[in-house]
Image (tube, helix red, strand yellow):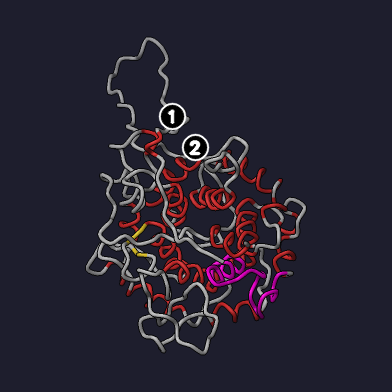
């Protein structure tokens, strides 16, 4: 069913596991830009040569392909892999957005912006027109005709951010729909946040519930805030930031729902929202009496004590210190320090995690033969990951 498909495409909703945190050794870098490049390099090895991320059956995993291609752009590295992915995505655009899926159209608009591709002729499709045609199909102001119970705010936020990327004005009704979904002080525990969907705006939002994954959450809030700030300064931004701040964990990171454990996916999305709102996630309220969100995010990156094939990926509460593919894509978004839309991207070479520079020679004797300087970014050797390195990513089992 379409609602289930949309929810599956949605940013991986990480379920809190009480008492579980980053379990790997020291991260390979404390610099977030470098960490993003390491993570993107790990992701690039996940792509099939045809340009997509395969699933367990070696068929295209469309959700991860879109997410991870966007991660390469956010990090600004692995340009050849990005180009291969964009070729595959454009060639398959019609099937990717079959039925007018607004979340996927939003992704394609963000990618078109990063790749400097005309969004009105993306694989032969006028993406903004396709998206605008879905407005109000289910209810006034909402993009798409699928059940919004689990993905209403998600798909609306991606759609609006995508239109901003394409420099297309978002209809006022669509902006109002998302703004009106923000929780207010009728329930103080929810004030300023967004939950997946509010069917009755006259009723207060639910209180955050980490056991049942209900009430406002950091993921929906971060996405909505990015979307609304991509249009213009939003009147509810301060309340949204206050809500996020009350959900910050002791290590500086964020859980999916208040009361759950910190995870890299949620932390990365909140970092993007903080940046979109014009604040610095490493200072001010975000760094008081605890490490900051960026420090927390980077603590999940797999370091130099791990197998070479695993270095640079990001673990999650479910991967026992091994790279979690779903977590890595979103972690790169946050580590890049860039909110959506990204704008046109210029790519550079990705650094190699844990590479030790060759020693410099101090001899004054001229060498008998010319020397060869080692490249700072050698091609990553082909490494087959052991079966044990394949993590299990838990997420809500959504029906509908």
Who's the residue at 58% across and 72% down the image? 148
Seen from the viewer's position, the closer of residues 194 and 288 is 194
Q: In which quarter of the image is the N terminus?
A: bottom right
Who's the residue at 40% across and 18% down the image? 371
Is residue 158 located in the magenta-colored stretch of the structure?
A: yes
Seen from the viewer's position, the closer of residues 243 and 77 is 243
In the image, residue 130 above or below residue 232: above
Label 1 SS: loop
Q: Name the residue under label 1.
A: 383
Q: Name the residue under label 2.
A: 45
In the image, residue 86 above or below residue 226: above
Label 2 SS: loop
Seen from the viewer's position, the closer of residues 375 and 325 is 325
| Magenta segment main secondary structure | loop
In the image, residue 236 above or below residue 388: below
Q: Are circles 1 and 2 on residues that touch, CB within 8 Å?
A: yes
Where are the magenta residues, as a range? 134-160
Q: Position of residue 243 (x, y in %)?
A: 38, 76
Q: Where is residue 399 in the image (x, y as percent from the top left)?
A: 53, 64
Q: Where is residue 28 in the image (x, y as percent from the top left)?
A: 32, 43
Furthest residue to the front? 399
Q: Quadrant of residue 51?
A: top right
């Amino acid at each position: 069913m379409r609602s289930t498909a949309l929810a599956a495409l949605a940013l991986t909703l990480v379920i809190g596991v009480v008492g579980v945190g980053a379990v790997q050794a020291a991260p390979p870098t404390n610099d977030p830009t470098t960490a993003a490049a390491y993570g993107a390099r790990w992701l690039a090895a996940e792509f099939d040569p045809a340009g997509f991320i395969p699933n367990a059956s070696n068929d295209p995993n469309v959700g991860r392909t879109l997410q991870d291609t966007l991660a390469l752009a956010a990090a600004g590295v692995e340009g050849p892999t990005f180009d291969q992915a964009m070729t595959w995505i454009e060639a398959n655009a019609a099937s990717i957005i079959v039925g007018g899926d607004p979340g996927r159209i939003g992704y394609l608009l963000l990618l078109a912006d990063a790749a400097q591709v005309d969004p009105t002729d993306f694989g032969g499709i006028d993406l903004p027109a396709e998206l605008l045609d879905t407005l109000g199909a289910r209810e006034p102001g909402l993009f798409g005709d699928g059940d919004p119970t689990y993905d209403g705010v998600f798909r609306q936020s991606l759609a609006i951010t995508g239109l901003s990327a394409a420099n297309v004005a978002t209809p006022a009704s669509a902006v109002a729909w998302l703004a009106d979904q923000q929780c207010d002080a009728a329930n103080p525990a929810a004030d300023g946040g967004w939950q997946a969907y509010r069917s009755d705006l006259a009723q207060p939002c639910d209180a955050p519930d980490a056991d049942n994954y209900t009430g406002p959450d950091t993921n929906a809030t971060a996405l909505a805030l990015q979307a609304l700030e991509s249009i213009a300064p939003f009147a509810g931004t301060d309340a949204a930031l206050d809500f996020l701040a009350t959900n910050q964990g002791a290590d500086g990171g964020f859980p999916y729902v208040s009361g759950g454990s910190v995870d890299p996916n949620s932390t990365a999305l909140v970092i993007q929202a903080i940046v979109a709102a014009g604040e610095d996630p490493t200072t001010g309220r975000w760094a008081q009496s605890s490490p900051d969100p960026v420090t927390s995010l980077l603590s999940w990156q797999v370091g130099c004590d791990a197998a070479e094939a695993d270095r640079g990926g990001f673990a999650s509460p479910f991967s026992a210190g091994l790279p979690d593919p779903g977590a890595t894509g979103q972690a790169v978004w946050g580590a890049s320090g860039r909110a959506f839309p990204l704008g046109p991207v210029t790519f550079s070479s990705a650094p190699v995690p844990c590479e030790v520079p060759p020693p410099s020679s101090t001899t004054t004797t001229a060498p008998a033969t010319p020397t060869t300087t080692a490249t700072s970014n050698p091609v990553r050797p082909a490494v087959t990951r052991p079966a044990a390195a394949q993590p299990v990513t838990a997420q809500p089992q959504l029906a509908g």
